[in-house]
Amino acid sequence: MLSGKILITGSNRGLGLEFVNQLAKCNNSPEMIIATCRKPEEAMDLQTLANTHKNIHVTKLDVANEASYGSFVDHVKDLVGSTGINLLVNNAGYAPKSTRINMVKWEQMQETLLINTIAPLMITKALLPLLTAAASKSCIDGFSVNKAAVINMSSVLGSISANAQGGLYPYRASKAALNAITKSLSLDLQHQYILVASIHPGWVQTDMGGKNAPLTPQESISEIVKTLSKFNEEHNGGFYQYDGKQIQW
Ligand code: NDP
């Protein structure tokens, strides 16, 4: 199970909402869940959950709005105090439609790379002092998501070796680049014992995944929680699917 202080982006629907839901309802619910979303006032399902689980703090964050990061980080610091953040889940993501070679647009590339690639890196950078604080104050030895970790929600569609169908230029490129960021972060942060990994949640029934996906958000997230809680030094800098199986870059 996951413990400590956990921050999840894009928590108002889909996988982010289910992640918050399962963490809140489990037997040993983490000390604090900072559930961020673009429009807290419209996030009814998340607000309902937060009303009955006092460890959930719904917090406004548009990951694409860098100008808001300063006040966001100050607010998170006030919430978590000197013990920092144990786990950052960069979950917010975007997948534009109609992106085959004759359709793809400049703006789709820009927006997708901004949300799926640039934002997770810059949010991690902004929250790094809080992750470092958590790592230095934890009594857990070695690498653990319960000590200090960044988990990037990637996709098998970002695997260059698994690409057999082409197309999906913005999304594939954004997740491949996110995986490159995962690798560099894992090397840069290893001396501070901050674990960094990419996760593919499977093909899941959400607004993004659609109704034909084989997995429900409940199935995907319950496997992800089990997988993350087993992560150690071996997993640092790796790319794994929801059930723990390693994926080739
Ligand atoms: P959904 O489309 O259901 O939800 C996307 C979430 O990201 C929403 O909460 C959305 O908020 C949020 N978001 C988008 N843009 C921003 C932004 N600028 N700032 C803050 N939040 C934003 O997607 P999923 O839940 O399915 O996907 C979650 C993650 O899993 C994504 O990173 C996705 O790429 C990845 N993934 C999903 C798969 C699937 O099959 N579902 C497969 C592989 C990977 P809002 O409501 O405000 O738009």
Image (cartoon, rainbow, N blue to C red):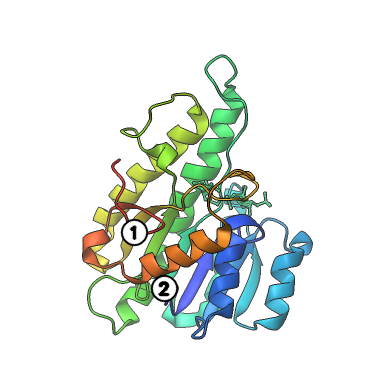
For disc 2, the marked residue is 86
Q: Is residue 128 left or right of residue 24?
A: left
Quarter of the rendering occupied by the N terminus? bottom left
Q: Horizontal and vertical percent for residue 194? A: 31, 66
Q: Is residue 50 above or below residue 109?
A: below
Q: Residue at x 36, y 38 (%)?
A: 159
Q: Residue at x 29, y 49 (%)?
A: 183
Q: Residue at x 28, y 60 (%)?
A: 189
The local secondary structure at tag 2 comes to loop
216 and 39: which one is in front?
Answer: 216
Q: Is residue 17 left or right of residue 30?
A: right
Q: CA separation, marks 1 and 2?
A: 20 Å
The amino acid beneath tag 1 is Gly
Q: Is residue 240 above or below residue 179?
A: below
Number of other residues with Cα within 10 Å of mark 2, as a class: few under 14, some 14 to 19, many 20 or more: many
Q: Is residue 172 left or right of residue 19?
A: left
Location of residue 52 by image quarter: bottom right
Disc on res. 65: none
For disc 1, the marked residue is 244
Number of other residues with Cα within 10 Å of mark 1, as a class: few under 14, some 14 to 19, many 20 or more: some
Q: Is residue 217 visible?
A: yes
